[in-house]
Amino acid sequence: MRGITDQGRKIQERLGFRIGDRGTHSSRTIMLAELRLLLNTLPPDAPKRAHFDAIIRDNILGKRTVSTREYSARRLSEMYGLDPSIPLYRAMRFFWTADNEGRPLLAFLCAFARDPLLRLTAPAILSTRQGETVTTERIEAELAPAVEGRFNQSILNKVARNAASSWTQSGHLTGRAHKVRSHPVATPANAAFAIFIGYLEGKRAQRLFDTVWVKLLDRPLEHVVQLVVDASRRGLLVYKSAGGVIDILFPDLLTQEEQELIREQG
């Protein structure tokens, strides 16, 4: 997302991405357990106000005070959008309903698109081989030059610890105090969502398989292609391949206006 124009930034934010210096991982993780409770309570087309009412008024997350309910609502909104008018959240919600096993990675993909701080930690994780240890210090070392002294040591450490927890919730790491690189569960719905996020960025054809979103699936390319084919068979997207030319569409997930916005940024 570097080098993006002001117009491109506005379009990407309209589509659901969050760009800039701030990120929710300075205070929270991807909050997977809370997200599960929330989405299990509400229908996919519930408006943003209903999400906030469920958290604050109905206290479905079981928080002790109104202030902690409000805080949780704000952080979940930052991380996911919680608004079906946002294409990124709408798609995540669609795939969430279609797939139970892949929900941790669905949540992580959405959070990764919406939290600049989480994105900055990716090299520390993705460059680590399976079975190797990933320390908080290693994540901090990746973060420090990227944030250019904006955080003191205490906040930097907190971001690194929160990020390590989020990468564990997604399945890229395992363990509690001792984090080890592992493979997350990757399903057809995960692959479809990863491709969809690249589609929102304006990628098309083979370029859809060469994005950080697909890298987060942590699978060889041929496996990702098979997952996308399986997703097409399940009606999660439209996949066509003929004569070496690939065409992928999401006819049920985007409005005409959103399609035009995507073309405009391209």
Image (cartoon, helix red, strand yellow):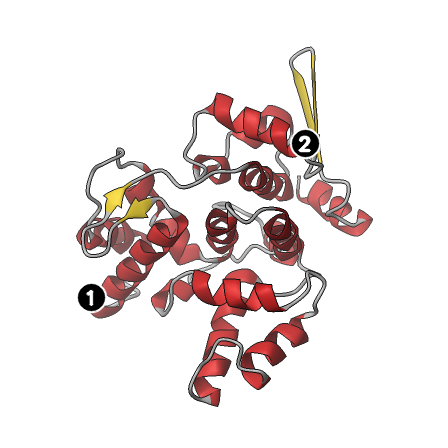
Q: Which residue is mark 2?
A: 232
Q: Image point 49% across, 48% down: which residue?
A: 109
Question: Residue 215's image quarter?
Answer: top left
Q: Amino acid at mark 2?
A: Ser
16 and 50: which is toward the camera: 50
* Circle 1 residues within 10 Å: few <14, some 14–19, many ≥20: few
Q: Which percent across, then down, holds residue 168?
A: 33, 51
Left or right: 194 in relation to 233: left
175 and 81: which is toward the camera: 175
Q: Is residue 91 visible?
A: yes
Q: Which percent across, then down, holds residue 185?
A: 43, 40
Left or right: 254 in relation to 56: right
Q: Which percent across, then down, holds residue 66?
A: 48, 88
Say above or below: 51 vs 56: above
SS class, disc 1: helix
How many dots with numbers? 2
Q: Which percent across, then down, holds residue 219?
A: 43, 30
Question: Residue 16's image quarter?
Answer: bottom right
Q: Name the mark on residue 153.
A: 1
Q: Quadrant of the C terminus?
A: top right
Left or right: 221 in relation to 173: right
66 and 205: which is toward the camera: 66
Say above or below: 80 vs 59: above
